Amino acid sequence: MVMELRHLRYLVTVADTGGFAKGAARLHITQPALWRQIRDLEAEVGLRLFERVGRHVRLTSDGDDLVMRGRDLLTRAEAWVDRASALKSGRTGALRVGATSMTVESVLAGFLTRWGRRHPDIEVRLTEDSGGHLLDRLERGELQFAITVWGDRRFRSRPLFPAGVLAVIPSAYRLKMRKTVDVRDLAEQPLLLLRDDFISRRWFNAACEVAHVRPPVLLESGAPHTLTALARAGRGIAVVPTNVRVARTGVRVAPIVFRGRALGGWMGISWDPRRFLPPYAESFVDELIASTARSYPGSEFKLRPPAPRSAEPSRAARQASNEMNSNAQP
């Protein structure tokens, strides 16, 4: 039996997108052509991989097993291609980096300007998304690095800077003189919140649940600057992460705490150790860490969330990762 990698790629794409129509669109082929390729694959392996349920298709148990193993094979094949490309091009190449819009604005915009001067032949291609979606993209191989909350066990990562949650308080509100704002002080205040897929919102929700408070919510949005603009207009208190740049005209900004401790965690840069990283990728990580050590968003609030464990990878762990990259096979 001779198997082509494109058949595996078609199989995994249909599984990931949930159907042949979306799979064909992602692969830039027609739906009938994709269907024929899957039927050819089924004939070659002698197994039925998909079954129809009404107007939809779903993986069979055999198909589910082969999709899981197919992803691993594709990851190794892509690592082999990436390694060959890096060996051929030397110091010239590209990095695919994902971050939230707030991190792009407050951290990467200035850093990439300095990085570009020192590494003019390395292109950095940015992807903007929410933190959870960035990690999913990283796992699928769409990104080489994701800058989001530190600590997902699926990946290798290094911490960058502490992050917290801020209250943006209109100047007419009685809380405007507070240096910090306890979650319980917001119980009766009209709030302007980010959506639930933002990590800072989850931090805030968790504290509210423990404190047994349910503040009134005027608006949920995916745009933090919309919330701060409404706060500036006196429409409510905006709750945003510390990596949002807030103009202080007409508002006061204070960290949100619970029982005297700031809400928050650590931002970090993560990568998939199964995938090959070019030599210049390590320089990117080291220089970004050095840059955020000098200055990071929210540093003026002197937040002290719990320090991440194993903040610096051990020598043995780094050596094991390097060996995995150097031994990657198709």
Image: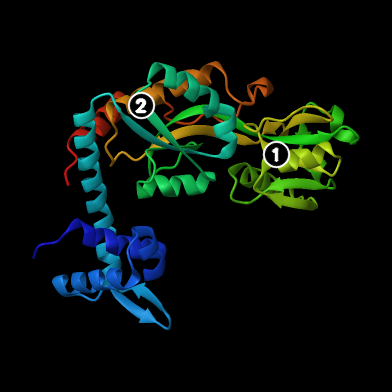
Query: Which comes sooner in the sequence, label 1 or label 2?
Result: 2
How packed is label 2: few (under 14 Cα within 10 Å), some, or many (20 or more)?
some
Residue at x-position 24% and y-position 64%: 66
Identify the residue under disc 2: 122
Of residues 118 and 191, the one drawn nearer to the viewer in this rendering:
118
Residue at x-position 27% and y-position 23%: 91
Residue at x-position 37% and y-position 73%: 58
Could you say where residue 215 lies in the image, as x and y percent from the top left? 79, 50
Q: Secondary structure at mark 1?
A: helix
Q: Is residue 115 left or right of residue 257?
A: left
Q: CA distance from mark 1 to mark 2?
A: 31 Å
Q: Is residue 35 above or below residue 91?
A: below
Disc 1 residue type (three-letter):
His
Identify the residue under disc 1: 225
Could you say where residue 307 lies in the image, as x and y percent from the top left? 52, 28
Where's the N terminus, which quadrant?
A: bottom left
Could you say where residue 133 lies in the image, as x and y percent from the top left? 49, 49
Q: Is residue 96 left or right of residue 112?
A: left
Residue at x-position 65% and y-position 22%: 302
Q: Is residue 78 visible?
A: yes
Q: Is residue 207 above or below residue 246?
A: below
Q: Quadrant of residue 9?
A: bottom left
Which color scheme is applied?
rainbow
Marks 1/2 in contact by CB < 8 Å: the verdict is: no
Disc 2 residue type (three-letter):
Ile
Could you say where residue 320 lies in the image, as x and y percent from the top left? 24, 32
How packed is label 1: few (under 14 Cα within 10 Å), some, or many (20 or more)?
some
Q: Extreme left residue here?
A: 1
Q: Secondary structure at mark 2?
A: strand
